[in-house]
Amino acid sequence: MVRTVQVPPHGCERWVESLGFPTDEGWRPWAVGGKVAGGVIEYAVPHVAPSSDHNERCGLEYATVHGAGHGVPQHRPQAALAMLEAVLAGNELPRLHNWPRL
């Protein structure tokens, strides 16, 4: 994984991993305009709200934006907008063209 030196993600990655959720999909790039915008790891999280389907799962995504530091909207506005739109619509972050689902 390519990491930005502006905001090292190591601590956040370790914290998310310490939660112990299984990986639903390992690291993959996500894209804006056909170019890599960052990386994302998807975790399967047990659904904790009352539900008729107790096997239902919800997701947790740990995503990074390459080269943005803390100022994602300022330094990578297209990536920030794509991420916000995906989250609000309940969609996964856009895939890099032809990147297989693992």
Image (cartoon, rainbow, N blue to C red):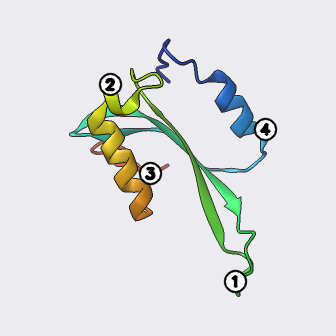
Residue 53's disc is 1
Does residue 91 lie above or below 51 as drawn? above
- The location of residue 39, given as percent across then percent down, is 46, 34
Q: Residue at x 50, y 24 (%)?
A: 1
Residue count near mark 4 (Cα–Cα under 10 Å), binned few <14, some 14–19, many ≥20: few
- Between label 1 and label 2, give the one nearer the viewer: 2
**How far is disc 2 from disc 3 in space, using C-alphas?**
29 Å
**How far is disc 4 from disc 3 in space, using C-alphas?**
24 Å
Left or right: 75 with respect to 26?
Answer: left
Q: List the residue tagged with mark 2.
A: 75
Q: Are marks 2 and 4 in contact (CB under 8 Å)?
A: no
Within the image, what quadrant is residue 46 found in?
Answer: bottom right
Q: Are marks 1 and 2 in contact (CB under 8 Å)?
A: no
Chain-order first, disc 2 or disc 4? 4
Mark 1: amino acid: Asp
Q: List the residue tagged with mark 3.
A: 101
Does residue 8 lie above or below 35 as drawn? above
